[in-house]
Image (spheres, rainbow, N blue to C red):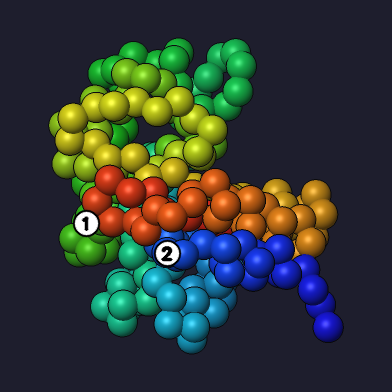
Amino acid sequence: MNRCMDPLLAAFERTPDTPAWFFRDDDAGWADQRLLAVADVFQRSGVVLDVAAIPAAISPKLAEGLRALVAAGAVAVHQHGWADVNHQRDGRRSEFGTTRTPADKLRDLRKGRSVLCGLLEGAVEPFFTPPWNRCGEDTVPLLAEVGLTVLSCDVSAPRRDIPGVAQVPVRVDWARCWREGGPERLGAELARALRELGTSTGGDGAPALGVMLHH
């Protein structure tokens, strides 16, 4: 029997109140068939998949498929940047990093939200996931200006306390764990994240255990 999830099961046994979980799949708009296959797995499991969609990359055909999945309660779709293009001239990659002006970033945020809401007929959550899980500090206040009320980055990213913008980070990178150690590493990282959350149970103000996927 594969025992790779034993550390996670042990962590569950030591956690009196199980935290809320969510699974976020990034880069919708690329590799559509793989995305739909992942969504099908979650739908059959009865777990809602949070889909971070690249507005500039969503085709009409994929938009139709996502609308059907949203209507079925299988996925929830939110904005993943504008085009998932690196604009950072130095340092780590970022679409909304420090080398762009707030005006340029606000333009892309508005354009992305408008395009995505149009393609999905309004069935878009007011959440924002920046490509590469990072953005400049001056990006966060801009989110509320376009109706985005939740920011989801990696848990290692700096926390920005901005009124009107909640932060819901991901804590485990499924793909990276799989590359670096397969199911054993994944089980260990999930267990570690669960232990770090302690007895928090999700909900307003309480952390959730977010897992990032890349189909």
Q: Quadrant of residue 150?
A: top left
| Label 2 CA crowd tier, 10 Å (few <14, some 14–19, many 20+) | few
Marks 2 and 1 sit apart, C-alpha to C-alpha, by 40 Å
Q: Is residue 159 above or below residue 43?
A: above
| Label 1 CA crowd tier, 10 Å (few <14, some 14–19, many 20+) | some
The quarter of the rendered structure image containing the N terminus is: bottom right
Q: Residue at x 64, y 57 (%)?
A: 191
Image coords of residue 99 (percent x, y): 45, 13
Q: Residue at x 37, y 20 (%)?
A: 137
Residue 17 tag number? 2
Determine whether, in the image, residue 15 is placed left or right of residue 68. Answer: right
- First-in-chain label (2 vs 1): 2
Q: Is residue 56 above or below residue 203?
A: above
Q: Quadrant of residue 160?
A: top left
Determine whether, in the image, residue 180 is placed left or right of residue 52. Answer: right
Amino acid carrying label 1: it is Gly
Residue 208 visible to the viewer: yes
**Residue sitting nearer the eye, 108 or 130:** 130
Q: Which residue is mark 1?
A: 118
Q: Is residue 161 above or below residue 25?
A: above
